[in-house]
């Protein structure tokens, strides 16, 4: 059976959610689609200067977080996709300690999502047992340039810009080995025509480095924030029907779900939509939070 491997958000940020969800996923596997598995969970704790993409906010003990991943045989990924790192930042104690901790795991290999080639070379030298993922924060929208990125031996996976998701004719030209390295970003809500995406990511990189220059998004409806219903209408959206009927036949199996900067209720909705059979979605909600005394108002 062809399977989808989901790469889920919130390794540190949503540790408490996964602490409840993963036992359900194991004990009631029949509630969930048999054609999907959890490939990894990614994220970063608060105050990591190597962080990028989104500002991390998890405060849980990294050893507890890693122990949970080990218990369920899930690869942990650090989101160290800061694009503005300099040599002086490479000695950061907290980020190095996290890499050393993830490298200790011998059962399931852990990884790092990176943007900076400077950081990549440092990690390859000091933490050779980790694998590396090329970050979507590179905003590579030229397909030829993307193919060059995919062919780099440094990376096990490459996450393309979501605006290339539907370039079906070009995706079909990749070899099977190249297709295995592609990890599609499924549920991006950002405006498809955005010209400031790279500047937005750079603003997060500056924030993680302690710089306070804010980036103000000027795209349509940006003040509304993330809405899953709006993401589903995005031209780059990849839903479960497309995964099974379009991407599986083309030979792709890795799919990233975004959401580190959102709330846990939305992450649960992603887990329900992408992984849970419709007839069991209420069961999952009841097990996680929904009881007969819950008041919304």
Image (cartoon, rainbow, N blue to C red):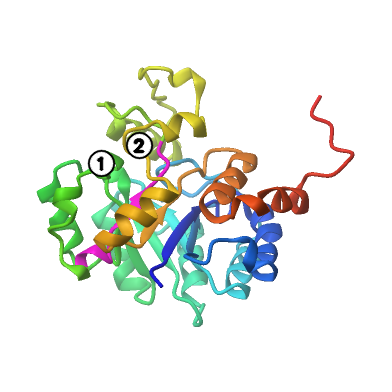
Q: Quadrant of the C terminus?
A: top right
Residue 185 within the segment the image draws in magenta: yes
- Would you say the residues marked 2 and 1 are in contact, meaning their CB atoms lie under 8 Å apart? yes
Asked if one can make out residue 89 in the rendered structure from this viewpoint, the answer is: no
Q: Secondary structure at mark 1?
A: loop
Q: Is 112 left or right of 251, judged from the image as shown?
A: right
Q: Secondary structure at mark 2?
A: helix
Label 2, residues with CA under 10 Å away: few <14, some 14-19, many ≥20 = many
Name the mark nearer the viewer: 2 or 1. Answer: 1
Q: Which residues are magenta?
A: 178-188
Which residue is at a point 33% across and 64% down the rendered structure image? 132
Using the image, determine if residue 27 lies above or below residue 21: below
Q: Position of residue 271 (x, y in %)?
A: 57, 51
Identify residue for label 2. Answer: 201
Q: Quadrant of the N terminus?
A: bottom left
The residue positioned farthest toward the right in the image shown: 293
Using the image, determine if residue 210 lies above or below residue 221: below
The residue positioned farthest toward the left in the image shown: 144
Using the image, determine if residue 189 lies above or below residue 250: above
Total numbered circles: 2
Foreground of the two, 245 or 275:
245
Q: Position of residue 82 (x, y in %)?
A: 36, 46
């Amino acid at each position: 059976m062809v399977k989808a491997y989901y790469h889920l958000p919130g390794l540190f940020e949503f540790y408490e959610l996964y602490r409840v969800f993963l036992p359900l996923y194991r004990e009631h596997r029949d509630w969930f689609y048999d054609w999907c598995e959890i490939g990894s969970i990614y994220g970063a704790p608060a105050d990591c200067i190597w962080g990028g993409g989104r500002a991390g906010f998890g405060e849980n003990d990294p050893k507890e977080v890693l122990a949970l991943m080990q218990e369920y045989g899930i690869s942990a990924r650090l989101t160290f996709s800061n694009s503005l790192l300099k040599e002086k930042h490479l000695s950061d104690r907290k980020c190095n300690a996290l890499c050393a901790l993830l490298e200790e795991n011998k059962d399931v290999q852990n990884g790092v999502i990176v943007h900076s080639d400077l950081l990549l070379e440092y990690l390859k030298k000091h933490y050779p047992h980790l694998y590396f993922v090329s970050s979507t924060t590179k905003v590579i929208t030229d397909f030829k340039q993307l193919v060059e990125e995919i062919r780099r031996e440094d990376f096990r996976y490459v996450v393309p810009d979501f605006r290339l998701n539907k370039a079906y004719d070009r995706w079909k030209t990749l070899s099977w080995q190249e297709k295995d390295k592609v990890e599609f970003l499924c549920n991006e809500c950002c405006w498809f025509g955005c010209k400031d995406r790279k500047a937005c990511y750079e603003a997060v990189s500056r924030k993680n480095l302690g710089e306070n220059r804010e980036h103000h998004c000027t795209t349509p409806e940006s003040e509304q924030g993330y809405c899953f219903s709006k993401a589903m209408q995005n031209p780059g959206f990849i839903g479960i029907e497309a995964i099974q009927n379009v991407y599986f036949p083309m030979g792709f199996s890795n799919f990233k779900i975004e959401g580190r900067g959102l709330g846990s209720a939305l992450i649960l909705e992603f887990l329900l939509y992408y992984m849970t059979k419709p007839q069991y979605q209420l069961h999952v909600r009841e097990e996680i939070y929904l009881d007969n005394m819950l008041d919304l108002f």
